[in-house]
Image (cartoon, grey):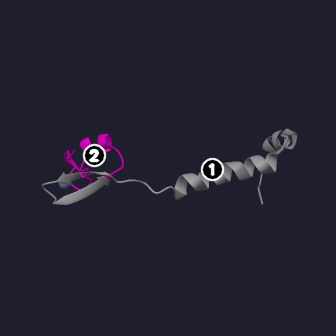
Amino acid sequence: MITLDPTTWEFAAKMDNFSGWVRKQIQAEMTKQAKPKEFKFESYCVRCNTWYKHTTEYDAKFHTCGSCGRLCDFMSTEVAQ
Ligand SMILES: [Zn+2]
């Protein structure tokens, strides 16, 4: 299942629970990928009439348009209090 080279195999053999450790790493990775991302912020390129979605306010504020390379306008989709 797992291919190791002689150096890593030697190290892995000395680990208490290598299989368990590997499973834990993979599960952590699966959890990370399965977690739905919240695209709460948007930016908009006037020139290209294109919307971009972002997970953080910073990304939305400093996003450069993928088509024309201009800095997009920041648009928050969060409801104002
Ligand atoms: Zn653009």
Which residue is under mark 1? 28
Residue 61: x %, y % from top left: 25, 42
Please name whichever residue, 36 or 52, is drawn nearer the observer in this view of the structure: 36
Q: Residue at x 27, y 55 (%)?
A: 52
Disc assigned to residue 60: 2
Q: Residue at x 78, y 49 (%)?
A: 20
54 relative to 70 in the view: left or right: right
Q: Quadrant of residue 27?
A: bottom right
Q: Which SS does the magenta portion mostly show?
A: loop
Kind of element beneath mark 2: helix
Q: Residue at x 82, y 43 (%)?
A: 12
Kind of element beneath mark 1: helix
Residue 51 showing in the rendered view? yes
Q: Quadrant of residue 71?
A: top left
Disc 2 C-beta below 8 A from ligand 1: no
Of labels 1 and 2, earlier in sequence is 1
Disc 1 C-beta below 8 A from ligand 1: no
Residue 54: x %, y % from top left: 33, 50
> Eyeballing the image, is 10 above or below 78?
above
Answer few, some or many: residues within 10 Å of disc 2's Cα (few below 14, many 20 plus, some between 14 and 19): many
Question: Is-magenta flag for residue 62?
Answer: yes
6 relative to 80 in the view: left or right: right
The number of numbered discs placed on residues in the rendered structure image is 2
Name of the residue lying farthest toward the left: 47
Q: Residue at x 53, y 56 (%)?
A: 33
The magenta-colored residue range is 54-81
